[in-house]
Amino acid sequence: MEIKGRDFISISDLNAGELLGVLERAVHFKRELGAWRVKPSLTGQLVGLIFQKPSTRTRVSFEAAIYHLGGRPITLNSSELQIGRGESILDTGRVLSRYVQAMALRTFGHWEVEELAKAADVPVINALTDLEHPCQVLADLMTIREHFGDLSGIKLAYVGDGNNVANSLALGCAIAGMDCTIGCPKGYEPDAGILGQARSMVGRDSIRIVHNARDAVEGAQVVYTDVWTSMGQKEEHRRKRDLRHYQLNSDLLTVADAEAIVLHCLPAHRGEEITDEVIDGPRSAVWDQAENRMHAQAALLDLLIGLD
Ligand code: CP
Ligand code: NVA
């Protein structure tokens, strides 16, 4: 498995073998970090992290991963860059790629990360766009694998807004051979192009959309939700009204598999898409999931730019 020098814009930039390779490397890092034995494969390497939207986990988990691997992150918020005064993200990225060995970008338009990858001479990583959140899904799949030992055939239900996380999850499930059901109101479905791409890998029956939360969660081994209003989205009031029957609460969880785990990419809007008793309850794996962002991204960077 060789992904050195590549970009990571979509979770579908990895095939099944490559995805498994990243996840296995992430497990390796988690173990080695626990024993203070991480090989510093990013020694002397700089990684630029550009944020055009807020971030807690992505920023800190990338910075921590880079630190543990012996590299140095340079985190840049768009408000303190010339981007804030009108310089294009492309020109910015083109210049930064002369200074750093890899770049991650969190922004609005997915095309911006794609264009940046074309312009840059170093690997470009998608740290969230309106369309996808592939780094998140690496950690999600790692967490599911930790619990169930394998991914193939695992039944995942996502309830709520068919957003960037749902898009990447549908693709990730397809690549990993999982069964994915998305429960959302009409008009809140994931991106049609992404659904088509996911279904072309595993068939229509493995990537389903239903318009009822209970139908989605019935028998699921993983129950996932995310905020109803993502960064950059408007009409929060309307969205809350339309999505109110898709809350992940203890009642909904009763129809899931008895051993089901609950995931949420965070930040959570407690009392909206998820209740306190579920996120803080015995089925919740969200804190492990958040920790795994660091291990998964360490694995990704090691494989993309690590010194042998
Ligand atoms: N899950 C996630 O990406 O969190 P942040 O927005 O805090 O980075
Ligand atoms: N869907 C959310 C994910 C945040 C990590 C958003 O885009 O705001």
Image: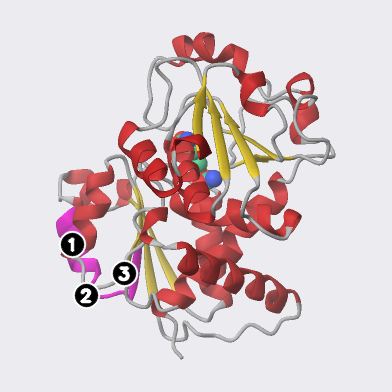
Residue that carries the numbered disc 1 in the rendered image:
118
Q: Secondary structure at mark 3?
A: loop
| Dot 3 and dot 1 residues touching (CB under 8 Å) | no
- Could you tell me which secondary element the residue under label 2 belongs to? loop
Q: Find disc 3 in the rendering and name its residue.
A: 123
Q: Residue at x 85, y 39 (%)?
A: 282
Q: Does 286 appear above or below 40?
A: above
Span colored in magenta:
90-103
Query: In percent of the image, x 42 and y 25: which residue is there?
Result: 189
Q: Position of residue 91 (x, y in %)?
A: 14, 58
Rounded to the nearest angstrom, the CA distance separating label 3 from label 2 is 12 Å
Q: Reply above or below: 138 against 273.
A: below
* Label 2 residue near ligand 1, CB within 8 Å: no
Q: Mark 3, mark 2: which one is toward the viewer?
A: 3
Picture disc at residue 208: none
Locate residue 156 relative to residue 240 in the image: left or right. Answer: right
| Nearer-the-camera pick, 204 or 281 | 204
Where 112 falls versus 264 (above or below)? below
| Amino acid type, mark 1 | Lys
Give the mark, 1 or 2, whose residue is nearer the N terminus: 2
Q: Mark yes or no: residue 126 visible.
A: no
Q: Which mark is residue 98?
A: 2
Distance (Cα) linking label 3 and label 1: 10 Å
Using the numbered discs, state the Cα–Cα distance from disc 1 to disc 2 in whole angstroms. Answer: 14 Å
